[in-house]
Amino acid sequence: MPESKKRRKNGEVAHEDTEIHSWTDGIPPSPQWWAPVFLTFLLLGLVWVLVYYISQAQYPIPGLNWWNLVIGLGSMLVGLFMLMRWR
């Protein structure tokens, strides 16, 4: 079991490293357009799926049938992946 650090006789505490480095140091923040774009993808996918269900598979594109769900969920996934990279 590791031992805790001991105080020195003159009252100073022994420090190994006084600076705490974060894994995000040096990573630049996202550009300003990043948040509106991922929100657009998320909301577009949500609206696409809602229109598909509310219209009973008649809209947004009638000939695609269940592929409309793939388009809507794919759009939401793109927005989610962008959200994970947002800083």
Image (cartoon, rainbow, N blue to C red):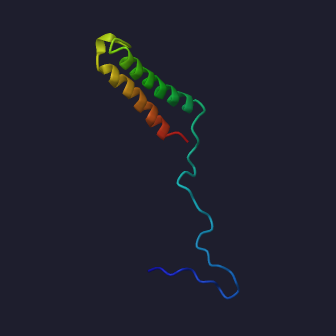
Image side of residue 55 versus residue 87, left or right: left
Tell me where residue 44 appears, x and y as whole percent. Answer: 46, 23
Quadrant where the N terminus sits is bottom left
Q: Residue furthest right?
A: 10
Q: Which residue: 41% across, 26% down?
A: 75
Query: x and y percent of residue 51 in the render?
Result: 41, 17
**Image coordinates for residue 4, horizontal then vertical, percent:** 54, 80
- Residue at position x 40%, y 32% in the image: 77
Q: Nearer the viewer, residue 83 or 56?
A: 56
Q: Taking 25 as reference, is 45 left or right?
A: left
Viewport quadrant of the C terminus:
top right
Q: Quadrant of residue 22?
A: bottom right
Seen in the picture, residue 65 relative to 5 is either above or below; the reply is above
- Looking at the rendered structure, the number of numbered marks drawn on it comes to 0
| Residue 14 screen position, x and y as percent | 62, 78
Q: Nearer the viewer, residue 68 or 25?
A: 68
In the image, is residue 51 above or below residue 85? Answer: above
Say which residue appears at 58% left-offset and 43% top-offset: 28
Q: Residue at x 59, y 83 (%)?
A: 6
Taking the image as shown, residue 55 lies to the left or right of residue 8, namely left
In which quadrant of the rendered view does residue 34 lie?
top right
The answer to which of 12 and 73 lies nearer the viewer is: 73
Relative vertical location of residue 77 with respect to residue 1 in this rendering, above or below: above
The answer to which quarter of the image holds residue 66 is: top left
Q: Is residue 64 left or right of residue 39?
A: left
